[in-house]
Image (tube, rainbow, N blue to C red):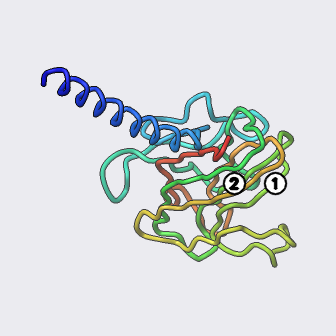
Amino acid sequence: MKQWLFCSGFSATLLALGLVLGQHSVASDEVVVFEDSFSTAPDARWTGQKGGSHGGKVVDNPIGEGKVLTFKKPVFGGDLFTAKLIGPGHYRLSVDYLVKGCPDDRCGGAIALVDESGKELKLLFGPFNVEGTKAYQGAKFDQVVPPTATWMPLEADFIEQEPFRLLLEHWNADGAKEGHVYYRNLKLVMQNP
């Protein structure tokens, strides 16, 4: 009887271990490549345009607890870039986004992918459709995100063939100023590596 209980317990342990390992193998189909909660100031993993300084800073969450990223001012061409190039692949990007007090629908944040030289590869998120604007003729954000007074989770699934940097900015629109755009909980996951 004791032997049967030992075998039964051992079998149950193997079954539980198999279930855990099975769940692990599913989770291993995705690898976190880059992550920042923005609870502390942007570190050496981030840089500005052409490796220079950036205007990203961490402040108190304007509508809740914790710390979040905002920018000192709107810029043209990106403000905060991942310092290292990220390899080609299939990715999912998630981030929380908040716009507070913007003067019009062109004010907001933008997230894009750029190549090593800074040339735009993909415009993932932005505050309005830039297609018809003089500076961005033919360009279009994959997702146009309206100003929102509450935290909005954004998610993009994309395949990129070239090495890239992730770019975040406060979109350079008339009347835009510090304290309009906020980000938190950014995560870039490679799928099926």
Please tell me which residue lies in front, 73 or 57. Answer: 57
Q: Residue at x 49, y 65 (%)?
A: 99
**In the displayed structure, does residue 94 sit left or right of residue 132?**
left
Label drawn at residue 175 = none
Please tell me which residue lies in front, 30 or 135. Answer: 30
Q: Position of residue 92 (x, y in %)?
A: 61, 52
Answer with mark 1 or mark 2, whichever residue precedes in sequence: 2
Quadrant of the frame with the N terminus: top left
Q: Position of residue 172 (x, y in %)?
A: 68, 61
Q: Amino acid at mark 1?
A: Leu
Q: Position of residue 7 (x, y in %)?
A: 25, 26
Which of labels 1 and 2 is toward the front? Answer: 1
Alpha-carbon distance for marks 1 and 2? 18 Å
Q: Position of residue 124 (x, y in %)?
A: 68, 61
The residue indicated by pointer 2 is: 75
The residue indicated by pointer 1 is: 121
